[in-house]
Image: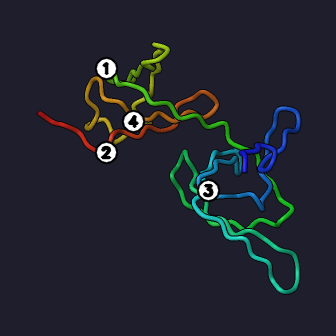
Amino acid sequence: MSYNQKSFHINRGCMRIYHSNNFRSGRKIIFENEPCLIESSEFVKPGKGQSFVRVKLRKLLTKQLIEKTFKSTDSLEIADIIEYTLSYLYNDGRFWYFINNNTFEELSVDEKIIGVHKKWLLEQDTCIVTLWNNQPISITPNNFVNLK
């Protein structure tokens, strides 16, 4: 079976959406004007009444976990989330600078977004930087660090 994009979303102008019956773990959506990761979803078809989908969402900006129930006719916009593997260059105290080794583009990330990860970042380390609407919202450093 080949991969078919139309099987899980449609394009209305420039807004792409997922229908609730296509909510799957790992997909990223916009809920309450905030990007969210679908952690789990359960399709429920009761003996009587309309079917629905029970979903656990992780808000990507606040890391808050929420549970929500959607009707089978509901749909939500697909979040414009991009993850890049970037190399850490340096910091100036307020911003942390990363470079894309393929395109040599630099990206600055605010210290608030770096958070507790700053003590584990060493120069030239690679990490995953998550962007939403071309703005960094989180970083994921390597699981293992060599501290010499």
Residue type of the residue flagged with mark 4: Ile
Q: Is residue 138 above or below residue 122?
A: below
Please name the residue that numbered disc 2 is placed on.
143
Please name the residue that numbered disc 3 is placed on.
38
Mark closer to the chain start, 4 or 1: 1
Q: Could you tell whether 54 is left or right of 115 in the image?
A: right
- Frontmost of labels 1 and 2 is 2
Q: Is mark 1 on a helix, strand or loop?
A: strand
Mark closer to the chain start, 4 or 2: 4
Marks 4 and 2, Cα distance to the nearest angstrom?
A: 15 Å
Residue type of the residue flagged with mark 2: Asn
Q: What element carries label 3?
A: strand
Please name the residue that numbered disc 4 is placed on.
114
**Front one among 52 and 110:** 52
Mark closer to the chain start, 4 or 3: 3
Q: Residue at x 65, y 45 (%)?
A: 34
Marks 3 and 1, Cα distance to the nearest angstrom?
A: 33 Å
Please name the residue that numbered disc 1 is placed on.
90
Mark closer to the chain start, 3 or 1: 3
Mark closer to the chain start, 3 or 2: 3
Residue type of the residue flagged with mark 1: Tyr
Q: Which residue is drawn at 31% across and 45% down?
A: 143
Q: Could you tell whether 1 is left or right of 123 in the image?
A: right
Which image quadrant for residue 54? Answer: bottom right
Q: Where is residue 86 in the image (x, y as percent from the top left)?
A: 42, 26
Q: Where is residue 109 in the image (x, y as percent from the top left)?
A: 45, 27
